[in-house]
Image: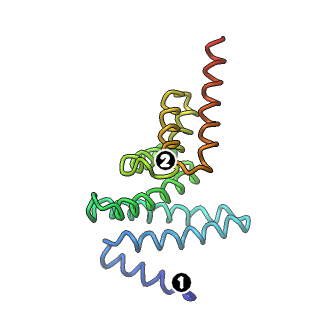
Amino acid sequence: LERQEEAIEVYEKLIGIEDKDADVRHLMAEYYYKKASGLEAAGNPAAAEPWDRKVLEYMTRGCEISRSTGDPADPSRVESHCQKLNFLATLQHELNDTEPEMATLREIVELDPSFPGASYNLGIFAHKAGDFEKAVDYYLKALNCAEDAQKAALTFQIGIINLQHTRDYRQ
């Protein structure tokens, strides 16, 4: 789209009239995310921060709309909603909003236990918090649905935890 600024104005007006379309919110969030990323890449993170917050606002509202619409048993709806939640979790991670990010990741795992990355990221959080048993559980869940290329990294993480347990046991 060559006239993105005009399209965004139209989307903003649409939301002002009727705010019921998660996809519109998602498209706008992606646009603002690219804008913020461009400012950060240009070395201006302070100018990017308000845009990042706007992305967070749009994605949060888009996920609220997505959560309340469609058939929860429809696999394509679940996949679409998980994709939106994953984008939200990524942004929350970038903004260091740890608790909301963990809640978003747990929602993804609850909706689709085989969604790539969500169990792995929860495993990382549990590992950093020192809850090795929970970390291994999350890593094993991720391992069960991972692609071959991801399995080595997951097995490595489980190995690190086992090594830490061995060291703790010896002390």
Q: Is residue 166 above or below residue 32?
A: above
Residue name at image x 31 percent, y 79 percent: 17
Q: For residue 3, which quarter of the picture?
A: bottom right
Residue located farthest toward the front when viewing the structure as drawn: 148
* Quadrant (top left, top right, bottom left, bottom right) of the N terminus: bottom right
Of badges 1 and 2, nearer the viewer stands: 2
Tag 1: amino acid: Glu
The reply to whether callout 1 and callout 2 are in contact (CB within 8 Å) is no
Identify the residue under disc 2.
145
The percent position of residue 15, horizontal first and vertical second, equals 36, 76
Q: Secondary structure at mark 2?
A: helix
The percent position of residue 42, horizontal first and vertical second, equals 73, 68
Give the colouring mode of the picture: rainbow
Residue name at image x 38 percent, y 63 percent: 61
* Front residue of this view, candidates 24 and 113: 113
Q: Residue 5's mark?
A: 1
> Distance of mark 1 from mark 2, alpha carbons?
40 Å
Residue located farthest toward the right when viewing the structure as drawn: 43
Residue name at image x 54 percent, y 55 percent: 90
Closer to the chain start, of discs 1 and 2, is: 1
Residue name at image x 42 percent, y 78 percent: 12
Tag 2: amino acid: Cys
Disc 2 packing (10 Å; few <14; some 14–19; many ≥20) = some
* Quadrant (top left, top right, bottom left, bottom right) of the C terminus: top right
Q: Is residue 165 above or below residue 88?
A: above
The percent position of residue 40, horizontal first and vertical second, equals 68, 64
